[in-house]
Amino acid sequence: MNPVGDLFKTQVWTLARHVGVPGVIIDKPATADLVSGQTDEGDFGISYRRADLILHWLLLGHRPEEIEQLGFSTVEIGLVRDRLESTHWKRKLPTVAMMSHTAIGEYYLRPVDY
């Protein structure tokens, strides 16, 4: 179960502050710790605060041209769109090993599955 999987990073930070998570944890830059000084935002090329706003508008179906009118650059929008499209596989459940003819999602689809 992933109780915060549907939240943007900025929403997780807000929730964490609300429930009393220490600021030192919330404010620590996300990093894979592969290189000293490297941060996820630095690698991404845009702050999560700006990326979350762009993602919000993209997910509501707004076109890049419309989002530009809100003060975001073509480059920023492209970074978020590219990341969204290149990580689509992460939002799909893993394949179920078919041990029967009723493997939901693989063989048998309920009306709610499609």
Image (cartoon, rainbow, N blue to C red):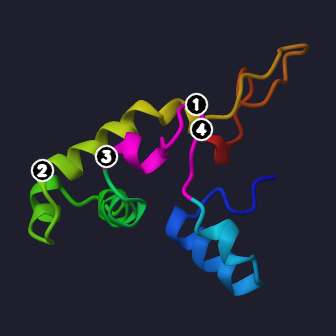
Estimate the x, y position of residue 65 in percent, counting from the top left.
9, 57
Residues under labels 4 and 1: Cα distance?
5 Å
Identify the residue at horizontal 75%, vertical 62% (top origin): 3
Crowd class of label 1 (few under 14; some 14 to 19; many from 20; radius 10 Å): few
Residue topped by disc 2: 74
Q: Is residue 74 left or right of residue 40?
A: left
Identify the residue at horizontal 69%, vertical 75% (top origin): 16
Determine the secondary structure under disc 4: loop
Crowd class of label 2 (few under 14; some 14 to 19; many from 20; radius 10 Å): few
Residue topped by disc 3: 45
* Mark 2: amino acid: Thr
Query: 90 or 112, which is in the foreground?
Result: 90
Q: Which of the two labelled residues, at mark 1 and mark 3, occupies the earlier sequence position?
A: 1
Residue topped by disc 4: 32
Determine the secondary structure under disc 3: loop
* Mark 3: amino acid: Gly
Determine the secondary structure under disc 1: loop
Q: Which of the two labelled residues, at mark 4 and mark 2, occupies the earlier sequence position?
A: 4
Identify the residue at horizontal 9%, vertical 69% (top origin): 69
Q: Are marks 1 and 3 in contact (CB under 8 Å)?
A: no
> For residue 91, which quarter of the picture?
top right
Give the magenta part as a residue range.
29-45
Marks 4 and 2: which is nearer the front? 4
- Main structural element of the magenta stretch: helix, strand or loop? loop
- Residue furthest out toward the right: 99
Q: Are marks 4 and 1 in contact (CB under 8 Å)?
A: yes
> For residue 58, which quarter of the picture?
bottom left
> For residue 78, which quarter of the picture?
top left
Marks 1 and 3: which is nearer the front? 1
Crowd class of label 3 (few under 14; some 14 to 19; many from 20; radius 10 Å): some
Residues under labels 1 and 3: Cα distance?
17 Å
